[in-house]
Amino acid sequence: MISCSEAVRQLWEYLDGALTDRDRSRIDEHLGACLRCCGEAEFAGELRRFLATGASATLPDDVRRRLLASLDDLDDLDDLEDAR
Amino acid sequence: MPAEGARVAAAAAGRQERFRRLVTGELDRLYGLAYRLVGRDAEDAVQDCLLKAFRSLDRLSDEEAAGGWFTAILVNCCRDRGRARQRRPDEVELDEDVERFSLFRKVADEDPFPYSDSLHVDFLGLFGRDDLHAVLLDLPEIYRVPLVLVHMEGYSTREVAELVDAPLGTVLARLHRGRKLLEKRLWEYAESHGLLEERTR
């Protein structure tokens, strides 16, 4: 059976479904026998969910206005870049 | 000449109008993504993206693909901005310490909530959205970008490899290292920002 450190090293990839069948079954075997690594796996899952709910921002109205207004100047900015 | 001038002006106006039509439906999404990638530089990053996209508009043959095209340009603009603002070098702390760091074990060993049955979940509960964002923004750009794109935006690792123009193996390695570094930085942030003291006070 693989060691705890080897199992832990691959836990995120395991949860991503990014491991080969062989590596996945080695992790499954390890998790079936190691309570501590089950805790690690559970926590890695929590961390993934935690990340997924991370910061988000809605576009503020003033920023939207500035960005849309800037579209009118793109031709000029384009020319300026060309002139550099 | 007047006729030629009018033709050129009409073509320029048409090009600008086409661009405006493509951009208008994308602005909210682009800004949201930029905010996750570069925080308060989001507006500037989107502005960079608009100019670059406009300059290469003639290369966009399929308007159905405009979303992905804007995303790829924006991600690169954010990477440029992220690198310019970065306080720490890219390849930082990626020694044995980070590779072996386990936030799960650290929380269990330090036991900041002695009476809790769910100390790991409690630990994550110390972080507000702004705290997590601050930790992410402080990660080197090469780790932050794949972490945000895969775990917050839902892109596959193959899509990220295309977006950042890197081999899949490189993206997978950066994701792995980025996660380890994120775990370590979450602990350090909780310590340095007094999150653990607030909770146990």
Image (spheres, grey):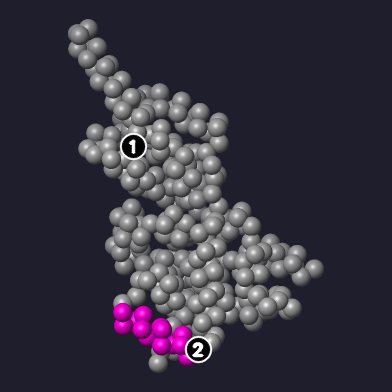
Residue B131: x and y in percent read 62, 57
> Can residue B138 be seen by looking at this rendering?
no
The residue positioned 50% from the left and 71% from the top of the image is A45
SS category of the residue bearing label 2: loop
The image shows residue B60, relative to residue B72, as above or below, that is: above
**Residue B155 or residue A83, whichever sits in front:** B155
**Residue B176 or residue A35, whichever sits in front:** A35
Label 2 is placed on what type of residue?
A: Cys
Label 1 is placed on what type of residue?
A: Ala
- Asked if badges 1 and 2 are on one and the same chain, I answer no
Residue that extends furthest to the top in the rendered view of this protein: B2
Residue B7: x and y in percent read 22, 15
The residue positioned 74% from the left and 78% from the top of the image is B115
Label 2 belongs to which residue? Answer: A34
**In terms of image quadrants, where is residue A23?**
bottom left
**In terms of image quadrants, where is residue B121?**
bottom right
The residue positioned 50% from the left and 89% from the top of the image is A34
Q: Tell me which chain the residue with mark 2 is part of.
A: A
The image shows residue B130, relative to residue B198, as above or below, that is: above
- Could you give the CA–CA distance between mark 1 and mark 2, rounded to whole angstroms? 52 Å
Left or right: A74 with respect to B58? right
Label 1 belongs to which residue? Answer: B53
Residue A61: x and y in percent read 55, 32
Q: Could you tell me which quadrant the C terminus of chain A lies in? A: top left
